[in-house]
Amino acid sequence: MIEGRRSHFLSQPVRLPVTLALMIRVNDQITIEDWELSESFIRASGPGGQNVNKVSTAVELRFEAERSPNLSAPVKARLKRLAGRRWTNEGALILQVQDTRSQARNREIAETRLKELVLKACETPKKRRPTRPTLGSQRRRIAAKKQRGEVKSMRGKVRYDD
């Protein structure tokens, strides 16, 4: 490399925003409209030879979940909790996929991951019913505690009362 010149692949990754022209059908009630999604393609890291420096195969899928009219408030809250660090301050869910060397395959993977995440958020969590411990388990616990106490009391200094 010539001193003072930077190679084109060492610069910042090029992000090309693309609006999808399709709807994603999650289930019978929920469809994600095309205006809620945007894709950008970035250069993937890792192995790939010269191809990795030339082609932007990694996909960054952005889903405007907070503005989505198809998701109810509880589903949005569960989706936010499931997304974790992938949730932005603007209320968007960002999925980055660079699993394969094919851009088309990475798009499919990102779409399926989004579907799975939304489906998981649609499931209402089962309410916890508090249960009482059985009488037998209470007795076993107390017996174990008494035995442990006896073992610990035997560890003290030995006194000779003669």
Image (spheres, rainbow, N blue to C red):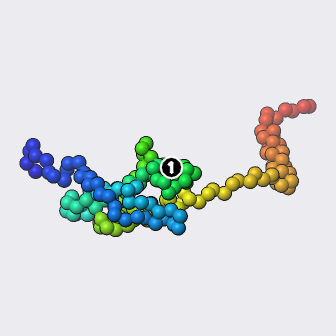
Vertical arrangement, residue 11 with respect to residue 100, above or below? above
Q: Position of residue 113 (x, y in %)?
A: 44, 62
Rate crowding at label 1 as few (under 14), some (14 to 19) or many (20 or more) other CA atoms within 10 Å.
many
Residue at left offset 26%, top offset 55%: 16
Left or right of 101 in this view: 90: right
Q: Nearer the viewer, residue 114 or 101?
A: 114
Q: Residue 9 at what x, y percent from top left?
A: 19, 53
Who is closer to the viewer here, 64 or 136?
64
Quadrant of the image occupied by residue 153: top right
> In the drawing, does residue 100 fall left or right of residue 13?
right
Q: Can residue 45 be seen by looking at this rendering? A: no
Q: Is residue 153 above or below residue 78?
A: above
**161 or 11, which is in the foreground?**
11
Q: Residue furthest right?
A: 162
Location of the C terminus (image quadrant): top right
Picture coordinates of residue 19, whole percent (x, y): 32, 58
Picture coordinates of residue 61, whole percent (x, y): 37, 57
Q: Is residue 3 visible?
A: yes
Which residue is most to the left? Answer: 2
Residue at 86% x, 51% y: name it.
Answer: 139
Reading the image, the residue beneath label 1 is 80
Of residues 79 and 132, the one nearer the viewer is 79
Q: Residue at x 57, y 51 (%)?
A: 74
- Callout count: 1
- Left or right: residue 48 versus residue 79 is left
Residue in the picture at 22% in, 61% down: 55
What amino acid does circle 1 point to?
Answer: Lys
Quarter holding residue 106:
bottom left
Q: Secondary structure at mark 1?
A: helix
Furthest residue in direction front, as rendered: 69
